[in-house]
Image (tube, coloured by chain):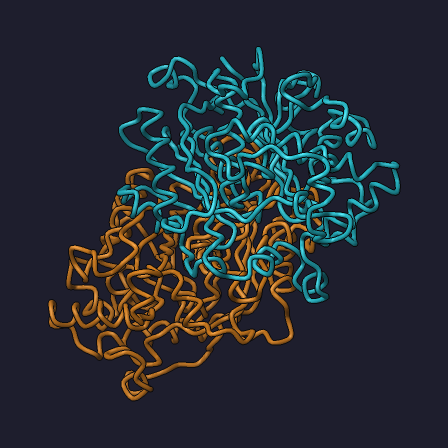
Chain colours: A orange, B cyan
């Protein structure tokens, strides 16, 4: 099994990209990654996309993107795990390189969500169609139930949830690719429109168009392309019940803890060895619960940890979502898992500008599908 | 890089499965494969599905199936390449096992197409949404253009196209899992309803519900589970333009020939070394052109070859679609690539009953997406 490195990155600005098609978006990100890595060709490519069919009436996304990227006859495969589609695309590219089947592999992700469809209905197809969606549930509703249960069980406050959004907007302010580059206050979150009690508009990640891509190759070849390759030291994935109501606990995300245990074991690391993490904050409560499942905080302590600054760039023990996270950077669902890897790559190679975490050497990405039915965790190390 | 074997298979009957949901269908196939392989657990799973979103309003298909299969927290990833989704699922499972990351991996595929959506519109999302679908093209229309060009260029006859359907129905008659177990005649094909000139109803594969699954493991472990493992000696994939109008030739399928060259090279074989093949006959013309691109016949000779019996079980030099093919067995698009592997497995292990090809030792599967924008070819060998 070959060691694998990331040698190049590229992404579009995230936002409402009215003048770009899904093809334009993916191709822009992929060309940037190819150029950044300095590779003359790729051997294979993966595209993470949640629902090309429902969002833009286009499936067969792998072949479409290989063609528009001018890469025929390179193999191109689309992978999907709802909002963890990008994470799975990265993982599949990892397997192909690790197996020795291919050398230079592009892992990308894309979603075009602002083209007029009912986004909430399209996203709901990540939940159980028969037993959840049919009965009217939406994702804000699912995460609102998690938030209510968490606040009840651990005496967490509305202000603590809001602190996640405030921190992530603060970080995203310094990310030129972020959808919302604006600082917000606790009061603004608390006074924003109610979406699904207790979650308000500023607790929710936005609807975003965007693309992201990275280039992977065997570690032994990485130095040919870059002086600062980043090694993939683990990639782990786990599944949990598709429906929230079937979980033993509403305040746990078992796919996250299961994947984390495997990821730490594979890398021979403990949570305290991680210097920074990109965590799937589709809603503020999601970052809090996931940060506990990742072992950064004890159960029930994730909410107060944010309020106390333990996840901030400036004073945190474990800076979380230095990119701005899904909340501020935006959440084009198929691209998110790749964009997380890009942030870690920039941090580990000292390219994160005003967002830079000092002495960052090991970073983690946690990408989640649905209400936590799937989770992909990658750990990267600077060499 | 580890050698990889197939050690178990399972599929549902293909057809209009009104009383089964997409979950029921996949779980039935997967449990059969797990039981057939005699494995106590799986380490990971892949689900090929073209469009859960458009066909049944369900994305996140990997996680859904892991859950209903009772396999949480096993990683589960859905892969898609339109009608080649099953082939890509098999290929991703191969990479995971070959890399040494996992041992027992399930590769499955499923589609539930008869639940009331406009199937032709849903399938059209495998073509270019902007430049083909928007202008009204459908898949029967695309393949009709290929058929017309082929008949004009090579003086092929309508009867020769019909001979593909007649042969495949003859084979499917002996396949208990086939959707249409009925012999048909050339006259019946020629007199069936016109769909897109020159293609008639009996030139077209049907709309099908169905699921299929196989179990892969490292070859070194295979003998623990079966006396007759089948080795995967190559897996190759290629891409071509998503749009038919952009091809240099309407009568070539370049993704097929590109993947074939790679597959033969990887296995160190020539076309004449292949004992039988499952070929993607979504329309009769597709089998003819693909059989040429696979090197079984010279360009322009594929149509007469069928008429002359060169692809029949009884007298063929290269029996094609012994299962009945997509035409008679049915074409649940996400499952087709896996069902092709199942037929080859049954043939190479002497379990094909009245469809058995004598002394079959090496078999090939060719699974194609759209009008040929993607193609996956696997070659399997009996040990």
Q: Which residue is pictured at 45% across the width and 72% down the height? A: A119
Looking at the figure, which quarter contains the C terminus of chain A?
top left
- Residue at left offset 54%, top offset 53%: A108
Comparing A332 with A268, the one in front is: A332
Location of residue A95 in the rendering, given as x and y in whole percent from the top left corner: 47, 37
Residue B123: x %, y % from top left: 59, 55
Extreme top residue here?
Answer: B359
Q: Is residue B306 left or right of residue B346?
A: right
Q: Quadrant of the N terminus of chain A?
A: top left
In which quarter of the view is residue B249 placed?
top right
Residue B64 position (above or below residue A175): above
Asked whether B293 or A290 is in front, the reply is B293
- Give the residue drawn at x 33%, y 39%: A267
Rendered image quadrant of residue B219: top left
| Number of numbered tags placed on the structure image | 0
- In this view of the protein, can residue A127 be seen by the observer? yes
Inspect this view and state whether residue A347 appears.
no
Instruction: Give how far across and how far down residue A208 sits, in percent.
Output: 49, 71
Q: Is residue B303 left or right of residue A134?
A: right
Residue A289 pos. (x, y %): 24, 62
């Amino acid at each position: 099994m070959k060691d694998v490195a990331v040698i190049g990155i590229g992404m579009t600005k995230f936002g409402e990209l009215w003048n770009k098609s899904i093809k334009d978006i993916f191709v822009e990100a992929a060309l940037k990654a190819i150029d950044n890595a300095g590779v003359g060709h790729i051997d294979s490519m993966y595209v993470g996309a949640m629902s090309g069919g429902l969002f833009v009436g286009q499936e067969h996304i792998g072949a479409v993107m290989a063609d528009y990227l001018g890469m025929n006859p390179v193999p191109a495969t689309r992978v999907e795990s709802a909002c963890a589609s990008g994470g799975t695309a990265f993982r599949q590219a990892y397997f192909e390189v690790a197996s020795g089947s291919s050398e230079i592999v592009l892992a990308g992700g894309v979603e075009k969500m602002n083209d007029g469809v009912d986004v909430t209905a399209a996203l709901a197809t990540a939940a159980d169609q028969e037993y959840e969606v049919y009965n009217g549930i939406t994702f804000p509703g699912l995460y609102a139930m998690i938030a209510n249960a968490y606040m009840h069980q651990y005496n967490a406050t509305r202000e603590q949830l809001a602190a996640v959004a405030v921190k992530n907007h603060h970080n995203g302010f310094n990310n030129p690719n972020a959808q919302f580059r604006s600082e917000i206050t606790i009061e603004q979150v608390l006074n924003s429109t109610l979406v699904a009690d207790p979650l308000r508009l500023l607790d929710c990640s936005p609807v975003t168009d965007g693309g992201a891509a990275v280039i992977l190759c065997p570690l032994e070849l990485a130095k040919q392309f870059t002086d600062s390759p980043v090694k993939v030291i683990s990639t782990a994935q786990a599944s949990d019940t598709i429906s929230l109501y079937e979980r033993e606990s509403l305040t746990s995300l078992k796919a996250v803890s299961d994947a984390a245990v495997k990821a730490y074991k594979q890398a021979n690391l403990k949570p305290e060895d991680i210097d920074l993490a990109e965590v799937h904050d589709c809603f503020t409560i999601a970052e809090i619960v996931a940060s506990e499942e990742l072992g950064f905080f004890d159960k029930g302590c994730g909410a107060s940890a944010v309020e106390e600054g333990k996840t901030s760039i400036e004073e945190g023990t474990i800076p979380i979502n230095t990119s701005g996270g899904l909340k501020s950077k935006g959440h084009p669902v198929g691209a998110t898992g790749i964009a997380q890897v890009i942030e870690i790559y920039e941090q580990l190679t000292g390219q994160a500008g005003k967002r830079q975490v000092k002495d960052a050497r090991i970073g983690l990405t946690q990408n989640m599908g649905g209400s936590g039915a799937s989770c992909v965790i990658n750990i990267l190390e600077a060499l």
